[in-house]
């Protein structure tokens, strides 16, 4: 017990007895409390532990920061994050609005899901539109058949944060998704330009989060940091979280590009030699239509998706994200600029 | 399936990245596209072998310089447990990073090169693990293949470390001889070390008993917020206190005392999102409704009458300094966050700096610099409700924040209330 290292501090407040493996009535000196020796294990499953941590984080932000907003794309991670946020404050209504950064290239099923969920909760939704930013000349659209609006999301996102005075922005990113995200804090500080400085992050100890910032700066908060893709699906199953239909098997017109199965749409013209066929697919991730690929799948239930994810030998971003394939550090580069 | 968080300490030279790569690879947690990306980068860099360290070093600067800059978190699971690895770099800002990783760890894994034995760095890592009171410590003697799997080498290292660890506060210590490169005793038992009868590393990680590491006796419930949906008609009279339970067990009907007011009442109900909770225990997040309406707000704490935490404005603590800009000295004024309480603190006295390598106390110190550990007396603007860190890592810890830069500059572990000296 730190013999010879730290002097013993006699607090005299209570006598400590370490519970030895199981609880058998512990004596506590004055005001002794005897606990029933019920055969309860007092163990939480990994999903319960993750849920408890995420709810703690969401509540902590709402208590310490006066203007939070939750990014809700309609994807499975933001659906789980929203579910946790609702649980954190129930029966009180959600104490912050939702925000969707809309590239204009959405899957209609996802927009429909987004609007249904918002209506059901009576939540306030703010839409930050990439199209509006393009029309106003604030961002320039990429040219060519491989153009994507993915990277253009950063500007409208930062503008909406500034315009609404948000100082905490909940994001559904997970550390297991991508190697730059593996280095991300739960409370990730952003300067007045919205930039992330991975070499100069605040140390994060115990459950003691530091939300302090100056005016114009903000925090990105990632309550799902410690969840994996499989945890997300297991939780969706456990809690019956509704998702957009495209996460489950359906028939779709697709074509192959760079080894990935892209959904055909007016936003993504095919190149010479690319052939559109109808396949039985589902989406592992959901983002902008121009950079989100699907996988061949017949999984129509959560259980089948879990079996598929467990057996998969490719990561979800590897299977379905064209935006990460520009370079080894594509995600880090985007994140530094202020991306999700 | 239980969750186990562990921190790894050691430098690239000890084979730490290879070991983590091996754990992920042998538990099939590295997927094909990740491996392909590592192979491409290894090839482009001219590495002779697939450098599994590249899996872990995700930032551009890390890849360019071949170093690890920051704590990285990795995830894998087996049928028994889900694991979260806090991978802390051994060389750069070692203490700051290891303190961060160790603060939430159930277990610390320290690597030793069998050819080099116990080094200064090994002692430092072990000291930090004990300072942060990581309940379980595993010393992996790696590169056994380079010492011909010699039992004598392992025994000598074990004995030397055991001698050293007697000066520390380590409650559970294990030793495992491994070869991360060959996978010996990592996931599968080695045929080359028949003299070793203990578990493999993965078996140990899967089975080490962590459930009793929590304090299930002393109720500690810091209030995070008040939930009062006054506008909703249906829940007009609903009033509950939200929070995460950090110690003890709560049941409806239990008598509780509120700090700082000292009022006592009973728990009316426990629930989360409308679902009743029969018993709440760490680390559950719940809503607590009380029989009587009392004046309770964020930063207050529920405990059991007759068994409260210490309430004091004068605190004796060990502090690890995390700032590369400021220096901690007597007279410094900082913000302090402890459980859900935010206050201001003044350093009444910096007693000594503790050399993390030799454990020598320097009472002539001119202030704590980055990565240094020392003992301080703090005076806070309001009382904090705490336990000794060795009794409860959640109610015994705090962070210090620079009010000018808003940076987190200190990590504190409470020894107890400060007594006049």
Image (cartoon, coloured by chain):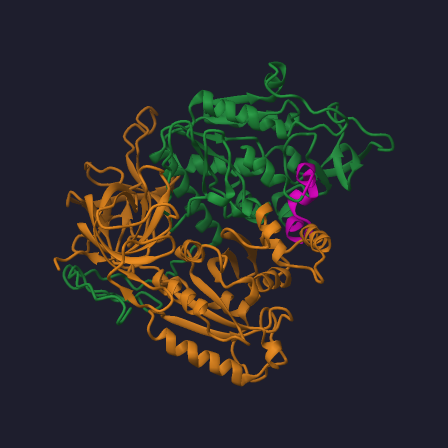
Chain colours: A green, B orange
Which of A140 and A279 lies nearest the eye of the viewer? A140
The part of the image, by quadrant, that contains residue A111 is top right
* Residue at image point 36% right, 36% down: A212
Q: Position of residue A68 (x, y in %)?
A: 42, 30
The answer to whether residue B36 is above or below residue B202 is above
Q: Is any part of residue A136 visible from this angle? A: yes
Total count of labels: 0
Which of B355 and A50 lies nearest the eye of the viewer? B355
The part of the image, by quadrant, that contains residue B276 is top left
In the rendered image, residue A315 lying in the magenta stretch gets the answer: yes
Q: Position of residue A73 (x, y in %)?
A: 56, 30
Q: Position of residue B143 (x, y in %)?
A: 58, 73
Report the span colored magenta: A307-327
The answer to whether residue B341 is above or below residue A3 is above
Which of A176 and B366 lies nearest the eye of the viewer? B366
Answer with left or right where residue B306 lies relative to residue A312.
Answer: left
The answer to whether residue A65 is above or below residue B356 is above
In the rendered image, residue B200 lying in the magenta stretch gets the answer: no
Q: Is any part of residue A339 visible from this angle? A: no
The residue at the far right in this view is A273
The residue at the far left in this view is B420
* Residue at image point 29% right, 33% down: B238
Answer with left or right where residue B225 lies relative to residue A105.
Answer: left
How would you classify the magenta stretch by its main secondary structure? helix
- Quadrant where the N terminus of chain A sits is bottom left
* Residue at image point 41% right, 66% down: B124
Q: Position of residue B388 (x, y in %)?
A: 25, 58
- Quadrant where the C terminus of chain A sits is top right
* Residue at image point 60% right, 38% down: A333
């Amino acid at each position: 017990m730190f013999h010879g290292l730290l002097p013993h501090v006699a607090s005299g407040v209570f006598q400590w007895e370490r519970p030895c493996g199981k609880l058998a009535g512990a004596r506590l000196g004055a005001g002794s409390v005897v606990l029933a020796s019920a055969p309860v294990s007092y163990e939480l499953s990994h999903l319960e532990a993750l849920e408890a941590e995420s709810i703690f984080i969401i509540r902590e932000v709402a208590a310490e920061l006066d203007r939070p907003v939750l990014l809700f794309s309609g994807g499975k991670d933001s659906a789980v994050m929203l579910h946790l946020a609702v649980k954190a404050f129930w029966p009180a209504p959600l104490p912050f609005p939702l925000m969707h950064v809309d590239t204009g290239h959405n899957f209609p099923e996802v927009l429909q899901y987004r609007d249904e969920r918002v209506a059901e909760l009576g939540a306030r939704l703010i839409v930050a539109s990439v199209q509006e930013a393009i029309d106003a000349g604030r961002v320039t659209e990429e040219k060519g058949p491989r153009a994507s609006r993915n990277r253009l999301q950063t500007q409208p996102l930062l503008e909406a944060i500034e315009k609404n005075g948000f100082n905490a922005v909940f994001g559904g990113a997970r550390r297991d998704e991508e190697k730059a995200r593996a280095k991300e804090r739960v409370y990730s500080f952003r300067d007045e330009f919205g930039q992330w400085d991975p070499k100069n992050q605040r140390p994060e100890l115990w459950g003691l989060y530091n939300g302090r910032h100056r005016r114009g700066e903000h925090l990105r908060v990632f309550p799902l940091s410690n969840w994996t893709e499989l945890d997300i699906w297991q939780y969706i199953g456990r809690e019956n979280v509704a998702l957009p239909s495209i996460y489950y098997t359906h028939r779709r017109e697709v074509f192959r590009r760079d080894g990935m199965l892209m959904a055909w749409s007016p936003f993504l013209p095919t190149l010479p030699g690319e052939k559109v066929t109808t396949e039985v697919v589902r989406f592992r991730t959901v983002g902008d239509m121009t950079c989100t690929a699907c996988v061949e799948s017949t999984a129509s239930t959560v259980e089948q998706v879990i079996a598929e994810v467990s057996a998969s030998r490719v990561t979800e971003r590897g299977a379905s994200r064209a935006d990460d394939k520009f370079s080894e550090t594509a995600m880090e580069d985007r994140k530094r600029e202020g991306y999700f | 399936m239980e969750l186990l968080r562990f921190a790894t300490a050691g430098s690239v030279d000890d084979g730490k990245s290879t070991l983590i790569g091996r754990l992920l690879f042998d538990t099939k947690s590295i997927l094909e596209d990740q491996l392909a990306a590592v192979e491409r980068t290894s090839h482009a860099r001219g590495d002779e072998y697939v450098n599994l360290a590249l899996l872990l070093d995700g930032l551009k600067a890390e890849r360019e310089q071949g170093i690890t800059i920051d704590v990285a978190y990795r995830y894998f699971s087996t049928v028994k447990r889900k694991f979260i690895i806090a991978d802390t770099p051994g060389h750069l800002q070692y203490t700051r990073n290891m303190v961060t990783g160790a603060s939430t760890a159930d277990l610390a894994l320290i690597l030793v090169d069998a050819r080099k034995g116990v080094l200064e760095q090994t002692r430092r890592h072990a000291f930090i693990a004990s300072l942060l009171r990581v309940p379980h410590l595993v010393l992996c003697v790696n590169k056994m293949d380079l010492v011909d799997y010699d039992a004598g080498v392992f025994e000598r290292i074990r004995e030397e470390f055991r001698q050293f660890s007697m000066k520390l506060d380590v409650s559970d210590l294990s030793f495992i001889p491994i070869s991360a490169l060959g996978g010996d005793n990592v996931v599968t038992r080695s045929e080359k070390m028949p003299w070793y009868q203990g578990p493999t590393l993965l078996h140990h990680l899967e089975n080490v008993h962590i459930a009793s590491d929590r304090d299930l006796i002393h109720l500690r419930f810091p209030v995070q917020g008040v939930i009062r949906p006054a506008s909703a008609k249906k829940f007009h009279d609903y009033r509950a206190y939200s929070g995460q339970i950090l110690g003890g067990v709560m049941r409806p009907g239990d008598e509780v005392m509120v700090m700082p007011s000292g009022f006592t009442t009973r728990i009316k109900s426990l629930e989360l999102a409308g679902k009743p909770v029969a018993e709440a225990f760490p680390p559950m997040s719940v809503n607590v409704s009380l029989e009587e309406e009392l004046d309770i707000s964020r930063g207050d704490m529920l405990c059991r009458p007759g068994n409260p935490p210490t309430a004091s404005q004068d605190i004796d603590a060990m502090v690890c300094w995390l700032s590369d800009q400021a220096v901690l000295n007597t007279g410094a004024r900082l913000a302090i966050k402890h459980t859900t309480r935010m206050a201001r603190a003044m350093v009444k006295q910096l007693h000594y700096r503790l050399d993390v390598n030799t454990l020598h106390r320097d009472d002539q110190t001119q202030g704590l610099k980055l990565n240094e550990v020392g003992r301080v007396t703090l005076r806070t603007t309001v009382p904090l409700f705490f336990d000794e860190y060795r009794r409860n890592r959640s109610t015994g810890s705090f962070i210090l924040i620079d009010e000018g830069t808003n940076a987190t500059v200190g990590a504190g572990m409470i020894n107890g209330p400060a007594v006049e000296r």
